[in-house]
């Protein structure tokens, strides 16, 4: 390996060299980001295709791959046909872990609860839950006009479900879990002052708004033990009026760090209100409409159109200005995400003191990116053009994939 890497610059060398994440050693600092696979089988579990999908990143040499959106309980699913983590699906989860491990790659599971951002018609609690009882526009087509503000009993139930899910993933052979604190899902609904209007100890200042998310982390930690890596994906800011400010994001990371999280993934935006901030590049609205079957949701999306799907032109490392502010606030691992497509960008991120990089679209474009990087160094070119046509495929029966022709090396 030394020979292969001898011509590489420091940052790239660091990226492709093994690294410790709490009690686990990754063969490099390249982590496949959670990208909702849309590869489920009829029994609400991951399909064999989903396992093959993750095997492509493992055989391509990533340090760790991430199974996306594992709901911790049935009501945590955005739609009723999605998967939730339960003992009965242990065989498929184990098969995934065994497959990925064959290639020396580690496996993480992203545990996410949609809370009020729900289109699930079969809710055991009847209404979508959130920090505050409030009008729920996304529920209108399903006759669910209001969310239900959670009491402490429900908070304990949900925190317990996160812990149970983490335990099931660990028992199946997963090497880490990633708790979703961002993107407008339940925990970020508590963090955002726009959706958290509580007057009790769970609302108001950021310490109060973080109380329930921290309870979830505490329950998960108790379940998985001190050596097991727990990552958290956060919204650094959401660029929505009255929503999560950069100051909130910095406090979120600081509080998670103090509570013993192993790494924070620095994302931005919300899937519910400002999805383009987390992607940048070409709008996903047109393709989302193509796959949307519900006429009322279609109408809503058309009406909200440009105000919801804002224009954020793509440029490399589009979240770096915000992400670089976090290094001084936290001691835990910092994981950069967002537009690290070309080796010059990866080099820069590593040299700036980030510990790992999560890649979404670049790995969809080229699942063997780590091997190609080792081979080609700075001559590597990924070629993802941020058309973002992979993203709406989250709603397509065929599952997500890059729509461009298969990756091949082109001279820069
Ligand atoms: C097809 C697709 C599906 C995604 N699904 C998820 C998801 O399930 N959970 C999540 O936290 N982020 C999801 N994301 C966002 C990515 O994890 C990542 O934050 C974003 O793509 C920016 O990183 P990139 O520039 O490396 O692609 C998804 C992105 C894409 C392209």
Image (tube, rainbow, N blue to C red):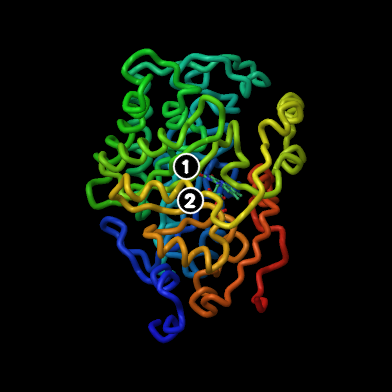
Query: What kind of element bears circle 1?
Result: strand
- The N terminus, quarter of image: bottom left
Marks 1/2: CA–CA distance: 7 Å
User: To which quarter of the image does residue 19 belong?
Assistant: bottom left
Q: Position of residue 171 (x, y in %)?
A: 33, 50
Q: Is residue 327 visible?
A: yes
Vertical position of residue 305 compared to residue 333: above or below: above
User: To which quarter of the image does residue 156 belong?
Assistant: top left
What residue is drawn where x is 43% and y is 44%?
233
Contact (Cβ within 8 Å) of mark 1 with mark 2: yes
What residue is drawn where x is 72% and y is 25%?
300
Give the residue at mark 2.
67
User: To which quarter of the image does residue 357 belong?
Assistant: bottom left
Of residue 233 and residue 127, the one placed in the foreground of this image is: 233
Residue 222 is tagged as none
Of residue 202 and residue 67, the one placed in the foreground of this image is: 202
Question: Dot 2: few (<14), some (14–19), or many (≥20) neighbours within 10 Å?
Answer: many
Question: Dot 1: few (<14), some (14–19), or many (≥20) neighbours within 10 Å?
Answer: many
Residue 70 is tagged as 1
What residue is drawn where x is 60% and y is 47%?
279
């Amino acid at each position: 390996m030394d020979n292969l890497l001898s011509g590489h610059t420091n940052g790239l060398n660091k990226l492709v060299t093994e690294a410790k994440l709490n009690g686990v050693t990754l063969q490099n600092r390249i982590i496949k980001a959670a990208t909702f696979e849309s590869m489920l089988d009829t029994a609400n579990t991951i399909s064999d295709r989903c396992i093959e999908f993750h095997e492509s990143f493992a055989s391509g040499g990533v340090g760790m791959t991430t199974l996306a959106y594992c709901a911790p309980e049935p009501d945590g699913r955005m739609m009723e046909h999605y998967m939730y983590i339960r003992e009965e699906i242990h065989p498929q989860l184990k098969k995934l872990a065994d497959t990925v491990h064959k290639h020396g790659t580690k496996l993480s599971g992203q545990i996410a609860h949609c809370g009020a951002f729900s289109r699930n018609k079969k809710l055991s609690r009847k209404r979508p839950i959130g920090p505050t009882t409030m009008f729920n526009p996304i529920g209108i087509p399903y006759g669910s006009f209001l969310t239900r503000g959670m009491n402490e009993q429900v908070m304990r139930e949900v925190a317990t479900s996160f812990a149970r899910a983490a335990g099931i993933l660990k028992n199946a052979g997963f090497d880490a879990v990633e708790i979703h604190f961002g993107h407008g899902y339940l925990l970020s609904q508590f963090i955002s002052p726009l959706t958290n209007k509580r007057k009790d100890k769970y609302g108001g200042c950021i310490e109060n708004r973080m109380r329930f998310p921290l309870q979830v982390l505490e329950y998960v930690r108790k379940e998985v033990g001190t050596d097991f890596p727990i990552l958290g994906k956060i919204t650094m800011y959401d660029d929505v009026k009255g929503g999560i400010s950069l100051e909130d994001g910095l406090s979120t990371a600081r509080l998670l760090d103090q509570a013993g999280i192993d790494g924070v993934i620095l994302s931005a935006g919300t899937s519910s209100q400002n999805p383009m901030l987390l992607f940048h590049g070409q709008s996903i609205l047109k393709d989302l409409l193509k796959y949307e079957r519900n006429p009322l949701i279609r109408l809503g999306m058309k009406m909200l159109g440009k105000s919801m799907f804002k224009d954020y032109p793509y440029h490399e490392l589009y979240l770096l200005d915000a992400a670089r502010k976090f290094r001084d606030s936290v001691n835990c691992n910092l994981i950069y995400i967002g537009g690290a497509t070309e080796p010059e960008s990866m080099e820069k991120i590593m040299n700036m003191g980030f510990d790992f990089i999560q890649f979404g679209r670049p790995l969809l474009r080229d699942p063997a990116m780590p091997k190609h990087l080792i081979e080609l160094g700075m001559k590597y070119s990924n070629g993802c053009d941020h058309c973002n046509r992979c993203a709406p495929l989250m709603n397509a029966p065929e599952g997500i994939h890059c729509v461009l022709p298969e990756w091949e090396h082109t001279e820069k």
